[in-house]
Image (spheres, helix red, strand yellow):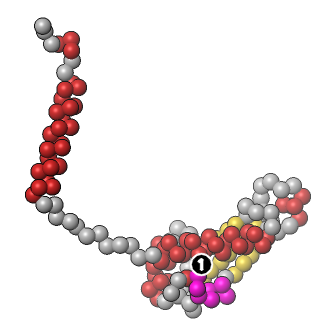
């Protein structure tokens, strides 16, 4: 089941604070910066395997208590920053929960090896010709 399809929003905890940067009086008066906190170990909607994967893959974004923190302060309204933080959460967790494809080794055929070696010889021949200095050649 996709992480967006679960009722995981009920486990989000939002904190607002004053945002830095441009904005004039709006920045000084209104708390538009949003911090989304998600407690991975205590989540009801994630399986144990998903929790382990998220904690491992997002270890740089998760604090020592297992809380994933995502902030958004680019917009001038709290609602837009909340929307951006939620989308960022789904994007980050979606990528972390994707299973990597297993790399299968492919054995080259004898003809493929021979073809590769011939191409290498042609390229090395070109390079060898470039090294010949015309001043050293006598007529």
Name the residue located 67 percent from the left edge and 71 percent from the top edge: 85
What residue do we see at 52% from left, 75% from top?
A: 94
Taking the magenta stretch, the answer to whether it contains residue 10 is yes
Whether residue 121 is situated above or below residue 106 in the rendered picture: above
Counting the numbered discs, the total is 1
Closer to the camera, 4 or 77? 4
Residue 17, visible in the rendered structure: no
| Among the 4 quarters of the image, the one containing residue 8 | bottom right
Q: Is residue 131 left or right of residue 75?
A: left
What main secondary structure does the magenta stretch of the protein show? helix
Residue 61 in view: yes
Relative to 83, 124 lies left or right: left
Q: Specify the quadrant that holds the C terminus.
A: top left
x, y percent for residue 13: 69, 81
Give the side of residue 100 with respect to residue 116, left or right. right
| Residue that numbered label 1 is attached to | 67
Image x and y of residue 55, in percent = 49, 77
From the top left corner, tell me how far across and down residue 102 is, in percent.
31, 73
Q: Horizontal and vertical percent for residue 90?
A: 59, 75
Tell me where residue 88 sits by quadrant: bottom right
Quadrant of residue 23 in the image? bottom right
Q: Nearer the viewer, residue 75 or 51?
A: 75
Task: In the displayed orientation, state which residue is furthest to the bottom.
Answer: 44
Query: Which residues lie in the magenta part?
Result: 4-11
Seen in the picture, residue 54 relative to 116 is either above or below; the reply is below
Q: What's the residue at 55%, 71% (across, down)?
A: 92
**Front-lying residue, 139 or 70:** 139
Q: In what element is the residue under mark 1?
A: strand
Q: Residue at x 73, y 73 (%)?
A: 82
Placement of 30 over or under 67, stated as above or below: above
Q: Is residue 115 magenta?
A: no
């Amino acid at each position: 089941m996709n992480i967006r399809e679960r009722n995981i929003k009920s486990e989000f905890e939002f904190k607002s604070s004053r945002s830095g940067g441009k904005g004039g009086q709006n920045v000084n008066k209104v708390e538009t910066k949003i911090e989304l906190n998600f407690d991975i170990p205590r989540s009801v909607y994630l399986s144990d395997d998903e929790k382990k994967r998220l904690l491992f893959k997002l270890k740089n974004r998760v604090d020592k208590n297992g809380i994933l923190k995502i902030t958004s302060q680019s917009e001038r309204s709290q609602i837009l920053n909340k929307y951006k933080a939620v989308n960022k959460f789904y994007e980050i967790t979606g990528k972390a929960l994707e299973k990597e494809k297993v790399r299968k080794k492919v054995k080259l055929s004898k003809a493929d090896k021979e073809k590769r070696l011939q191409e290498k010889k042609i390229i090395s021949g070109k390079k060898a010709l470039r090294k010949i200095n015309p001043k050293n050649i006598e007529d």
